[in-house]
Image (cartoon, grey):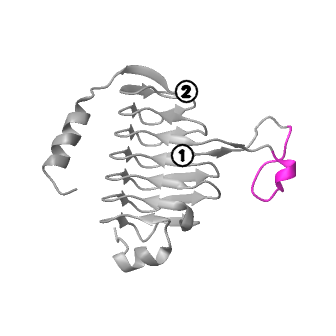
């Protein structure tokens, strides 16, 4: 995997670009002036980051694996120490599927009924491969989303959710908070 150099990263024109960012040269970025990326963050091959409105904010020590798409008009926030596994899709905008409106990017807004709502992914969240997060969702601090899950409702802090739609499975340890403190105390990160 080839990552962009610091000079190449700076030339993209991000709203904010942290230190030690590893961004694959195969990532597609749309409207970088609306996208912030924190320190020590890695974004792998074939990811799409596209904001057409309120922006995308990615925190520190975040890993976004191959083929992840983060798309929408409403705000999307991925807080510190998150892991987004391969082929996950995070949407802050969604067409109306009722059949009462037209859909798609080639149709003027007056003929569509697109739902836009922020997505907040709390600190220490891990999202398993192939999952989908829909608009208007908050995934609480320390939650884990199992692979191939559909997140269509908010998720409480420190729980594991699985399935289609995602349902609470069991509590997750909050030991990661102490691990974060030890890590930050023992490093210059």
> Is 54 a magenta residue?
no
List x then y, in percent, for residue 28: 52, 66
Residue drawn at (38%, 26%) of the image: 160
What secondary structure is marked by label 1?
strand
List x then y, in percent, for residue 119: 55, 41
* Residue ID for mark 2: 165
In this view of the protein, can residue 60 be seen by the observer? yes
- Report how far apart the C-alphas of labels 2 and 1 lie in the structure: 15 Å
Residue 117: quarter of image:
top right
Residue 187 versus residue 159 in the image, above or below:
below
Q: Earlier in the sequence, mark 2 or mark 1?
A: 1
Tell how many labels: 2
* Residue ID for mark 1: 90
What secondary structure is marked by label 2?
loop
Q: Quick one: quadrant of the N terminus?
A: bottom left
Q: Is residue 76 left or right of residue 98?
A: left
> Is 102 a magenta residue?
yes
Residue 2: quarter of image:
bottom left
List x then y, in percent, for residue 162: 44, 27
- Give the magenta-colored segment's residue range: 100-112
Give the camera-side residue of 88 and 172: 172
Q: Is residue 16 left or right of residue 110?
A: left
Residue drawn at (35%, 51%) of the image: 62
């Amino acid at each position: 995997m080839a990552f962009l150099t610091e000079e190449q990263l700076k030339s993209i024109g991000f709203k904010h670009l942290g230190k030690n960012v590893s961004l694959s040269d195969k990532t597609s970025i749309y409207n970088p002036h609306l996208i912030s990326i924190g320190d020590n963050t890695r974004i792998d091959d074939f990811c799409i980051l596209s904001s057409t409105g309120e922006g995308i904010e990615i925190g520190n020590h975040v890993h976004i694996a191959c083929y992840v798409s983060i798309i929408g008009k409403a705000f999307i926030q991925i807080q510190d120490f998150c892991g987004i596994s391969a082929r996950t899709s995070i949407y802050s905008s969604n067409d109306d599927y009722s059949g009462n409106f037209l859909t798609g990017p080639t149709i003027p807004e007056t003929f569509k009924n697109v739902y836009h709502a922020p997505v907040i992914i709390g600190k220490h969240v891990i999202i398993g491969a192939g999952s989908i997060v829909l608009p208007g969702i908050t995934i609480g601090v320390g939650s884990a989303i199992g692979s191939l899950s559909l997140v269509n409702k908010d998720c409480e802090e420190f729980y594991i959710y699985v399935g289609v739609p995602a349902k609470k499975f069991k509590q997750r340890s909050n030991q990661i908070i102490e691990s974060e403190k030890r890590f930050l105390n023992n490093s210059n990160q």
